[in-house]
C-alpha cells in the first residue's frame, strides 16, 4: 500500500508538472518559450516515477502513464490560457490537443523506454537519476543548437526557429554538473560493492 500511495502521488505530481510547465512557459515570444520547450525534463518525467514500480512491465506502464498525464496537464493549461479564436472553451481544448497529438505519440515511445530504464536504475540508488538527468540535459543542447543553425537539416528534423545559445548553454552546464555528481556516486557504489573488496 505505501508503494501504491507513492505511485499515486507521483502520477498526480506528473499532471501538476505539466500544468506548471505550461504556466511558466506562457504564450508570449520570450525566453520562457525556450525553457518551456526543453525536452530533458519531460524525459525525466517518465524515468523518475518508474523507479517506484516493481518489474520492467510495470515500470514501462508507469513511465507511459506519467508522460501522458504530464502532457495532458500541459496542453489543458495551454488551451485555457491561449487565445485560439472564437471556438469556446471545449473548442480551444480540442484544437490544442489535436494540434499536439504528435507529442502524445512520441510519449507512447519514450514513456515505456524510459520507464524500463527507471526500473533498471534502482540498483544504482540515487546515482542513476543524477547521471541520467545530466546526460539528457547535456545532450539536448548538443543536438538542438547545431540542428537549428543548419537550415536544411532543421527543416528535415525539427523545423524550429534558430534557438538562442545562452539558455541551452546553461542547460548543458547544469547537465555536466549533475552528470559528474552521478558518476562520482556510481564510483562510490562500485568501490563499496563486494566484488571490489580485497580478497582475504
Image (spheres, rainbow, N blue to C red):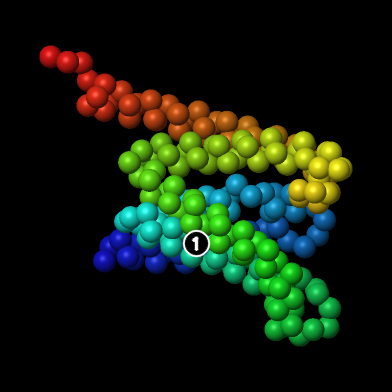
Give 72 or 154, whichever is nearer the viewer. Answer: 154
In x, y percent, where is residue 16?
54, 64
The quarter of the picture where the N terminus appears is bottom left
Q: Residue at x 69, y 35 (%)?
A: 142
Q: Residue at x 70, y 57 (%)?
A: 25
Residue at mark 1: 64
Q: Neighbour class for label 1 at 10 Å: few (<14), some, many (≥20)?
A: many
Element marked by disc 1:
helix
Residue 2 coordinates in the image, percent (x, y): 28, 62
Say which residue appears at 62% left-offset and 64% top-offset.
Answer: 104
Above or below for 144 versus 51:
above
In the displayed structure, does residue 63 sit left or right of residue 147? left
In the image as oriented, which residue stretches furthest toward the right? Answer: 151
Quadrant that contains the C terminus: top left
Q: Is residue 194 above or below residue 44?
A: above
Can you see residue 116?
yes
Residue 167 percent coordinates (x, y):
72, 40
Q: How many marks?
A: 1
Residue 110 locus on image (x, y percent): 55, 54
Q: Residue furthest left?
A: 200
Q: Is residue 55 above or below residue 128?
A: below
Q: Quadrant of residue 193?
A: top left
Question: Does residue 31 appear in the picture of this structure?
Answer: no
Question: In this rendering, is residue 175 above or below 22?
Answer: above
Horizontal arrangement in the rendering, residue 60 relative to residue 85 (left or right):
left
Left or right, residue 180 beside residue 190: right
The residue nearer to you, when weighing 129 against 107, is 107
Q: In the rendered image, which quarter is residue 198 located in?
A: top left
**Which residue: 84% across, 39% down?**
150
- Horizontal side of residue 1 vs 160, given as left or right: left
Amino acid at each position: 500500500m505505501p508503494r501504491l500511495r507513492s505511485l499515486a502521488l507521483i502520477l498526480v505530481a506528473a499532471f501538476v508538472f505539466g500544468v506548471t510547465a505550461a504556466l511558466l512557459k506562457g504564450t508570449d515570444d520570450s525566453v520562457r518559450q525556450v525553457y518551456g520547450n526543453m525536452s530533458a525534463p519531460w524525459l525525466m518525467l517518465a524515468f523518475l516515477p518508474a523507479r517506484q514500480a516493481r518489474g520492467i512491465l510495470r515500470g514501462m506502464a508507469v513511465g507511459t502513464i506519467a508522460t501522458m498525464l504530464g502532457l495532458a496537464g500541459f496542453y489543458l493549461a495551454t488551451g485555457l490560457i491561449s487565445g485560439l479564436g472564437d471556438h469556446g472553451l471545449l473548442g480551444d481544448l480540442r484544437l490544442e490537443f489535436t494540434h499536439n497529438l504528435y507529442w502524445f505519440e512520441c510519449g507512447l515511445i519514450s514513456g515505456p523506454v524510459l520507464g524500463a530504464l527507471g526500473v533498471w536504475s534502482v540498483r544504482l540508488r540515487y546515482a542513476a537519476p543524477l547521471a541520467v538527468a545530466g546526460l539528457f540535459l547535456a545532450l539536448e543542447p548538443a543536438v538542438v543548437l547545431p540542428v537549428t543553425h543548419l537550415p536544411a537539416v532543421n527543416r528535415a528534423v525539427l523545423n524550429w526557429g534558430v534557438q538562442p545559445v545562452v539558455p541551452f548553454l546553461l542547460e548543458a552546464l547544469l547537465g555536466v554538473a549533475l552528470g559528474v555528481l552521478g558518476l562520482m556516486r556510481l564510483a562510490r557504489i562500485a568501490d563499496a560493492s563486494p566484488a571490489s573488496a580485497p580478497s582475504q
